[in-house]
Every structure is written in C-alpha cells, then in structure tokens.
Image: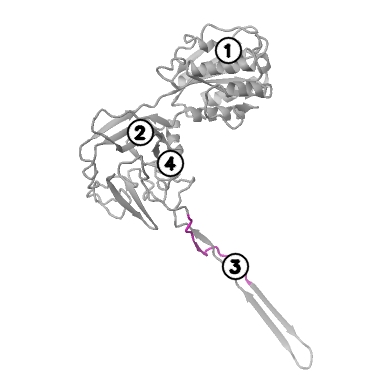
Amino acid sequence: MGKPGFVIIIPFLAISLIACEDGSSSSFLLDSGADTDTDTDTDIDTDTDNDTDSDTDSDTDSDTDSDTDSDTDSDTDSDTDTDMDAGPGCVDNDSDWWCLPFDCNDSDSTIHPGAIDSEGDGINQDCDTETDEGPPDTDITCGETDLPLTIDHVKLMILLDYSGSMAGTKWTSAKNALYQILVAGSLPSGLVDFGFDYFPRSGDCGMAMSVQTDCAWGPTHATNIYNFINGMSAPNGLTPLYLSMNQFINTMYAPVFLNTAVNPNSYLVLIADGDDYGCGTYSDIQLGNMAATLSSVLGVTTIMVGFGSGVSTTTLLAIANNGGYPSYPPAGYFTADNAAQLETALQSIVNDVVPCIYPVPPPSTPDYDPDEVNFYFDGILVPYNSDCNQTPPGVGIGWRWTTPAQTEVEFCPTTCQDIKDGNVTDITATFGCPSSTS
C-alpha cells in the first residue's frame, strides 16, 4: 500500500521515514547489523628514548664512540562508528524521544526527524537536507480525528505484616522503606493511588470490618498513610496471612480498591516476614487458592514480598504463582532483608505495574485509515519503532502496535518511563484518512 512519506538524509546514513505509520511493515530502512566502523589512529602513545652514550677510549688509537638512539612511537586509535547505532545509551537531552545523532538539534524538542518543517523561518525542523520545505506534499487529504487515550491510575494496596515477629529492627526497617516510598519521593507516585492495611488488626488474630485506608490519589494521602504507620505501637500477635487476604473477597471491605469495573489496575502487595501461623494455620495450597480467587474473580493481582528469612519458599511460590502478576523477578517473588532492599522491591513493583500498553479504540470517523496514525505525548510526536529496537529513533524509544488489528499500542521502555514518572499528562492519537497517494 502506498503511504505518504518523505526522505531524510543524514551523513553516512539514508533513512526513509513514513509520516503516518503502517503497523504492517517497517517504517525505516535500517542497517543490516554489520558494523562498518572506520578506525582512525588518534590515540597517541609516545615513547621517546634519547640515549646518548659517549665512550672515550684512552687507547692510542683515540677511539671515541658516540651512540645516539632516538625512538619515537606515535600511535593514535580512534573508533568512528559509521553505522550510527544509537543502542541502549540513547542521548535525548530535549525529551522529544529522538536520540542523538538522529536528532540534529537535541536542545530543542520541536526539531527532530518527522517534525513539520515550517516555511519561511530559516530552520530545518525535520533534520533533512532542506530548509523551509513546509509539510510533506503527500500529507493526508480528508481531515484528521484526534483520539485521547486515558492514562489510568494504578491502585496499590500495601498489606503489611504486624505480627510479633516484626517487632524491633524489622518494624523500623519497614517504616523507613515506606517513608521513602510514600513521603520522600524516591518513587514518582503521580500515577499510583496508595492504600494501606495490616494484620492482625487486634489481639492475636483479630480482623476488621473495613480496610484501614482505601486507595486515593495524591501526596497528602500518601503522607497520611505513613503518619498512621509511624504512629502505630510495636507489632504483636500471630500471622494470619490467609485471613488477611480473605478480607478482600468482600467488595465492601475496600470499595475503591476493589472496584475493578471502573479501574482494573488493582494490586495487593503483601509484605510478610513469616508463614501463616496460629490463626487456623492455612496450608500453602489454600494460600495459593486465595490468591487465584482474588485474581480470577475480583481482578486483584497479589504480589508477594518476603521480608527476612522467616517466609518459606513454598509459601512465597504458592502466592506468587497464583497471584496473577506477570512480571515477577526470576525467583517468582520479591525478597528483602532490610529497609534499602524493601524500598528497592517496592520501587520495582510500582515501576512494573504502571502500564506501557494501552487500548486504542477506533475513532468515530467511518473512513479513517488505521495505517495513518501518529501518537503524541502532551503534543510532542512520539516516533514509530516497529519492535522497540530499531535505530533510528533509538533502542527503547517510540511506540509499536501489539496487535495485527492495530487496536493496542505499546510505548517502548525508554519512552514509557516518562509515563511511569508522571511526566506525561495527555496521550493522543491522530488518525487520518486515506491520502491521495494511497
């Protein structure tokens, strides 16, 4: 299928870019992977040996031997990579999702390959060989439809072990880690709505009628959660893991967190330092079944964090393997022995659960062309990258379709990190109609 396009020529590399992306084929003519490095010697290694040996022989033949040895070695080694692979070390100083060297002005986010080269301003906005060329002549002809994508918040309920074995150093470490997560800002929490609960709630095995703090947005809410935790007395009681998870079967226990019909991104992060003990002592099979029920019936994903060495591997795996979380670390669960490790585990969880994949409903315009689409973050064009590994725009930069029907978009890891960091307010898709050259 013919597509509107234009050609950008960069020294040492010719690149064909498509103005509106085609999800069925590559948008770039890339290098084959062979490295065509040109090695020029510029690494100067100088060894100068000035050895003057004057030897006067008192012999009658008056032999004077003068020997001068001067050895200078200049060796220069400089590697110039002419295939210009951006690689994982992408440099993008102006946050326009184009890496050097493909971005010809990395201090101005309006200048990059694929930008519209405005006429009459003397600036080469699209980094090709021409200036002031204006929009491509083959741009879409029948109008555009802008479609906003909703950036859903993630609901993250922290369920914390409050049994007697947590007293002392463990409790202090847990509070320190949660302070960093909830208050100090080591995690960008713009897209995370925190909630908090703990077990047991009273005595050895006591439960409650409602969650301690339901999920809500904002730094003030997160700080209030930490202030409550910091004011709690020393932990005591037994370890009712199963009963604490069972509380969330009742949708009225935490109505915001459990309302997955409105927002399906609900994650229960269970932090415990021991196996289920003393309150019925439920088996690993029962714990796994409970995690499976929360996942399959209520749409709640359970993520297990073992704090210290008191939780058996079988318990960790029972919950991890049935909790519905697709991004567990290689062991199948998270573990931590101190505040720093617990903070790292929670950082990893939040980073994983903020989504990079979004559904793209078709626009209402009946004659739209799904192959004529661009995505924008706060009005800045995000480049297409067929498998998130192409250069340009750079490894991990851009977006790609995840379905042949082009109903779901994935933002590549480096680009998606801006979403995770809360730096993106609006994601929009601009659909065009078939062009005159289609």
In terms of secondary structure, where does tag 4 sit? Answer: loop
Instruction: State left or right for residue 283 relative to residue 188.
Output: right
Give the side of residue 359 with respect to residue 226, left or right. Answer: left
Residue at the disc numbered 2: 405
Q: Name the mark on residue 244.
A: 1
Query: Which callout, 4 or 2, points to the residue nearer the camera?
Result: 2
Q: How many other residues sit within 10 Å of disc 4, few (<14), some (14-19) or many (≥20)?
A: some
User: Foreground mark, 4 or 1?
Assistant: 4
Judge left or right: residue 407 versus residue 36.
Answer: left
Q: In the rendered structure, which disc, 4 or 1, sits on the residue that comes first in sequence?
A: 1
The residue that label 3 is drawn on is 46
x 71%, y 79%: residue: 53
Res 230 quadrant in image: top right
Q: Name the residue under label 4.
A: 387
Does label 2 or label 1 sit earlier along the sequence?
1
Measuring 61% from the left and 21% from the top, which residue is drawn there?
318
Q: Which amino acid does label 1 sit on?
A: Ser
Task: Tell me if 85 is positioned left or right of 321 in this view.
Answer: left
Kindly identify the amino acid type of the residue bearing the numbered disc 2: Ala
**Which amino acid lies under the numbered mark 3 shown in the image of this protein?**
Thr
- How far is mark 2 from mark 3, CA to CA? 62 Å
Q: Which percent across, then down, holds residue 285? A: 62, 17
**Residue 43, magenta (yes or no):** yes
Relative image position of residue 10 (x, y in whole percent): 36, 55
